[in-house]
Each structure stands twice: as structure tokens, then as C-alpha cells.
Image: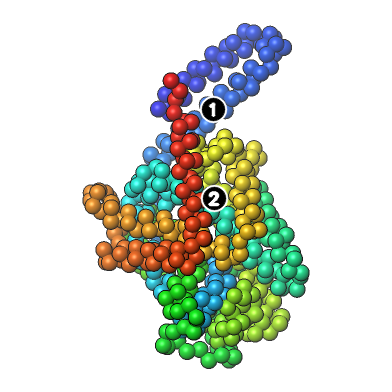
Amino acid sequence: MTNFLFVVFKLEILKEIAILKRDRYRIFHENSYYFRYLFKKVEILLRLFSLNEMRESMEKKQLKREITTFGALSTVMGTVIGAGVFFKAASVVGHAQSASLAIFAWVLGGALTICAGLTSAELATAIPETGGAVKYIEYTYGKLAGFLLGWAQSIIYYPANISALSIIFSTQLINLFHLSANLLIPIAILAGTSITIINLLGTKIASLVQSTTLVVKLIPIALISLVGLFTPGQVAVSLFPVETTANTGFLVAFSGALVATMFAYDGWLGVGNVAGEMKRPERDLPKAIIFGLLLITLIYALINFVFLKTLPIEQIAGNLNAASDASVAIFGPIGGKIVTIGILISVYGALNGYTMTGIRIPYALALDNLMPFSRQFQKLSKRFVVPYVAGIFQLAVAIIMMFFGTFDLLTDMLVFVMWLFNLLIFLAVFILRKREPELKRPYKVPGYPIIPIIASLGGIFILVTTSITQPILALIGIGITLLGIPVYLVNKQKMKPKT
């Protein structure tokens, strides 16, 4: 089809050039708009030519299988480890109201994440298309379901992440330099705006920021964990029995703590995307997921153990500066400030990662004319070739969220909404095993059907308990997601040819 269009437009251009040569004086003086028309044809021709070249190149080339087990392990850890571990301790401990239940929630959250990663990786290898989870859901449930995930990512997931991390960045900066609390929102807006501008200046600059902060973010984690473990603490931590002193009861306390950990483990859904480039995905991928996420779980449990032995529970619960306070207690005032600066850089890096990825989602939907005002969202900056309208839109939604949501509220909402779709992904493994048994699967979930069942039950538990304990948050998340249905139907109707 592309070759046919290429030939048609080539003939059209040749025809227009002939007319231009014949009547150039009259055309130039009487109809200057003609040139815009001609240049538009040239632009379309060049785009088609690029698409044709890209398609032929992709047909000739395949991804090289060069990633080893260690490479995949590094990818898993780099994707999942983020800034969440520094700040979700406040929420986890606040819900748990005991050291034993808090650590138990981190460990169980890691185990659930391992089952989730092992399950979703089967779809990543069976449906190795650009678009990841959107394509898995679209393949299994249809285009509307796939669009709803893209819609939820565009309106809730990425803006809420950017908003929450901007608030955290502002909170840490205010604490570090003892600034006025009234500057919380202005600094958060400045953080979100600055990182958006960096991304609008081109992918190279954004990638450089990401590469730099990727290394820096591991330094505070290593310092707090290793030094803090061997530093005498203020509190004697008891891990058994697993219990709580919360007035809400064990189940509510545990469910709140578990949901809070999920933000720190966020990122596991992308670990299966490297399967197509692995030497032996059927052997190496489960190893990378299991050992990578086990190591992350150990790190998260260890750093939270250090927090709990360094600070009293009352000082951690609800305190977004708990990591900074623990750093000061371990390293002293100057050392604590240095570690806090490292945490700030880690947060800024996470903010950059979500901004860089999030901008592409509404742009991709707009290319299929599925977003409202799709023509606007399709626009790329001429110099940097970045979807700047999508970037501005994402920032605007994030700024609005800053005025209406706290860090915990925003992160809990995005976790709830994404786990709606995570559950659909887990169930898709069962559906496709039955519907398409011959589908090529380079990797299959080990321990099937036990592992997918555990992942699915974990997803149901998170969704049900959040709906019970935070019904308004759940209703808002579901409502905004379902708002995508009329948007999808209206845009599909517009795309139908008029008769």
C-alpha cells in the first residue's frame, strides 16, 4: 500500500512541477497559496518515503539476541528501583503501625511483584510489539480496552507520577534549605516545568539527564543501607510476631501498607520488553525477573529496616522527610545533607523518566486520531522533533493535580488505576492459552497456572481493599478511566468516511 501511494504522489509532484515551469509567472503573482499546497505534497511524499524505508528495513532486520542474564538483571533493577522507596516508608509505617508489619508488607509486595513480572513477561514475548501493555490488552480484549489503558496513562498515570514526584522534590528542597512551607506548590510547579522544558529541547538532553541520575540514585540507597545497618540505632526492631497496634485492625492496616509499597515496585511491567533481544529468554528471563526483583525486595526491606532502627515509628509515620532525617541521624548534619542532595537528584531523575515516556502516549493515540484535538497533539517541534503539545498538556494536568492531591493520594490513585489493567494482563495469559494455544511463546510462565493465579489474586486484593478503604479515590480513578469510552466512540465516529 505504501509503495502504491509513493508512486501516486511521485507522479503528482512531477505533474505539478511541469505546471509550475509552464506558468510560473502567473502562479507566483496570482496564487501564492499554491506553493503551500505543493510543499504539503512534498512533505507527505517524504513522510511516505521514510515510512517505506523503515518498513523495508524492519523486514530485513531482526533484533539481535545479545542480552545476557546479567544484562537482563541490570535492566530489571534499573527499571524498578526509583525514588519511591525513600518516601513510601512514611505511608507504609503509617498504615502498619509496627516494624514487623511494615517489613512484612515490603517483602510480600516484592513477592507479588515477582509473580506479576513473571506473568506479564509471557505476553511481552508472545506479542513483541511497540506499545507494550497497550498492545497486550488490545490483542486480547479489543481496541477499546487498549485505548482505555493509553487514556488512563495519559490522564492519570503519568501526570499523577509527575505531580507526586514534583511535590516530593519540593518537600525535600524546603527541608534541606529550611524554606517556607508556602513555597511547596510554586517549587513543585517549577520542578515539573523545568523537566518538561528539558524534554522539549530534544531526546538527547533528556537521555543525558536520565543516564546521569540513573547512577546517582543508587548512591543514597547504598549509603543508607550499608552504613545504617552497622550504625547503632535508637530503636530495637522486632520482626516477629507480625502484628499491628493500629485501631483499624490487622487487615486494613496490612492492605494499606501493601498498596503503599506498590508505588516503589512500579516499573516491573516493562521488564519483559527485552525478551526479544535475549540469547535464551525461556531460561534467562525468569532468572532475571526472580533474582532482580528478589534483590530489589531485599534492598527495600533493608533500607526500611534501617529507617525503623534509626528513627521511632512516630517520626517515620506520615513524615515525607523520614529518609532525610534518618540520613542526618546516621551521617551527621553535613553528611545527611549530602545524602539528601543525592535523594533530590534521584527524584529529579525519576521525574525526567516519567516525563520523557509520558509525552509519547497521547502523541501515539493522536496519530490514530483517538485523542480529542488529535491534530494538535500530532504536532512536532520543527527544531527538536518532539511532541510539544503533548508535553504541555501533560504538564498542565500534572500542575492541576498538585493543587488537589497529596503525594500519597496521587500515588495510591495511579497504583489503583494501573492495577485495574494489570489484572486484565494477568487474566489475558489464561485467555490466550485457551484461545490461541498455537501462539508462539518464546517464554512461558514457570509454575503455570499457580504464578498467574497468585498475581491475579494479589491484583484483586489490592483493588478490593482500596475500593473499601478509599472509595472516593477508587471512584475518581474508575470514572476518569471510563470517561475514555465516549472519547473513543466520538473519535471513531469522526473517522468514518462520510457517505
Sequence-wise first label, 2 or 1: 1
Could you tell me residue 251's position as x and y percent? 42, 76
Closer to us: mark 2 or mark 1? 2
Q: Amino acid at mark 2?
A: Ile
- Determine whether 45 is above or below 298 in the image: above
SS type, badge 2:
helix
Could you tell me residue 224's position as x and y percent? 58, 79
Q: Residue at x 59, y 79 (%)?
A: 316
Q: Is residue 89 visible?
A: no
Q: Residue at x 45, y 79 (%)?
A: 249
Q: Residues within 10 Å of mark 1 (few under 14, many from 20)?
A: some
- Which disc, if any, is residue 404? none
Could you tell me residue 158's position as x and y percent? 55, 54
Residue holding disc 1: 44
- Determine whether 230 is above or below 61 in the image: below
* Left or right placement of residue 468 versus residue 169 in this view: left
Q: Residue at x 57, y 75 (%)?
A: 90
* Left or right placement of residue 164 versus residue 490 in this view: right
Q: Amino acid at mark 1?
A: Ile
Residue holding disc 2: 155
Q: Residue at x 44, y 28 (%)?
A: 496
Determine whether label 2 and label 1 are within 8 Å by CB.
no
- Front in this rendered view, residue 300 or 98: 98
Could you tell me residue 313's position as x and y percent? 56, 83
Q: CA distance from mark 2 to mark 1?
A: 31 Å
**Rendered image quadrant of residue 58:** top left
Q: Residues within 10 Å of mark 2 (few under 14, many from 20)?
A: many
* Left or right placement of residue 150 versus residue 328 in this view: left
* Quadrant position of the C terminus in the picture: top left
